[in-house]
Amino acid sequence: MMVEKEDLALSLSLNFFHKPHPLNLISSSDRNSHTCRNEDGRFLRGFDVNRLPSTVIEHEEEEETGVSSPNSTVSSVSGKRSEREDHDVDNRGNISDDEDAETARKKLRLSKNQSAILEETFKQHNTLNPKQKLALAKQLGLRPRQVEVWFQNRRARTKLKQTEVDCEVLKRCCENLTDENRRLHKEVQELRALKLSPQFYMQMTPPTTLTMCPSCERVGVPSNGVDAISQAHPRAVHMGPWASAAPPAHRMFDVFRQ
DNA sequence: TAGATATCTTCGTTTACTTCA
DNA sequence: CTTGAAGTAAACGAAGATATC
């Protein structure tokens, strides 16, 4: 659904100039203008990672002309980082000749091609180092900040999706355990009913020797003569074959109480 | 070594935009 | 055709972690 929508993303030629936000006169982007990290995470001086490379001037919108949204000729306005580095530069890296006085935040819609490339890159690595970010931004004709934000949102979407999957798995697991618990509970009731039938009881030979620990009320089945409960609990007492092997019902369902 | 600075990330939220009834 | 609700994606801001100077 989301992917389909992304595939339908329209090509836009948006302007990215704007006025500085009054509340963000000193922005994090100002820091970006002075330093950035190299691949090793070390800082490089005198390079603005959010300043679109001057080489990103050529247009590439021809691929999607004709599908632009009627609302697409808007400008990106707000944002700490973008307030400076985006000045007079649109999302294709073109110098804008239109000084928009609007202060409202406007959003662009990434083109189909841009989304596809971003997705492809995300498949390879879901985080980008500064060098990769710059290269990708240059390739797409976007600001590095846009690429960065896209990856942040993409990681968030991935995580959300994974959470939903995990939730579904746990839900199914819970349902299975509930069914199993119900089945065992029923089996215990049937066994207890048999215990109350003396004739049947006397004819039966114990299928096994059960050991119950008085402290934890667990029943263990011995193997090779020594069962685990006897070892762990010296006070464990041997029970008759029809002793209650299952914990009390109220305990059995404790697991599922929330 | 401690503090300042810069950048990254995640998380939660806001907002522009799209879709659909 | 218009409109409003709901959904989605781009963008923002805060906070924490980390690295460098």
Image (spheres, coloured by chain):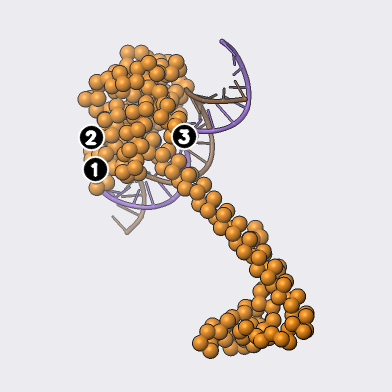
Chain colours: A orange, B brown, C purple
Q: Residue at 29%, 27% (x, y): give it.
A: A141
- Other-residue count near label 1 (Cα within 10 Å), few / some / many at <14 / 14–19 / ≥20: few
**Kind of residue at badge 3:** Met
How far apart marks 2 and 1 lie (CA) works out to 12 Å
How far apart marks 3 and 2 lie (CA) works out to 39 Å
**In which chain is the residue bearing label 3?**
A
Report the residue marked by disc 3: A2
Q: Nearer the viewer, mark 3 or mark 1?
A: 3
Per the image, label 2 sits on a secondary structure element best described as loop
Per the image, label 3 sits on a secondary structure element best described as helix
Q: Residue at 45%, 20% (x, y): give it.
A: A103
Q: Is residue A5 left or right of residue A34?
A: right
**Kind of residue at badge 2:** Gly
User: Is residue A87 among the parts visible in the rendering?
Assistant: no
On the same chain: label 3 and label 1?
yes
Per the image, label 1 sits on a secondary structure element best described as loop
At which x and y percent is residue A115?
36, 31
Report the residue marked by disc 1: A38
Report the residue marked by disc 2: A46
Q: Nearer the viewer, mark 2 or mark 1?
A: 1
On the same chain: label 3 and label 2?
yes
**Kind of residue at badge 1:** Asn
Task: State the residue in front, A134 or A35.
Answer: A134
Could you tell which of marks 2 and 1 lies nearer the N-terminus? 1
At which x and y percent is residue A117?
32, 33
**In which chain is the residue bearing label 1?**
A
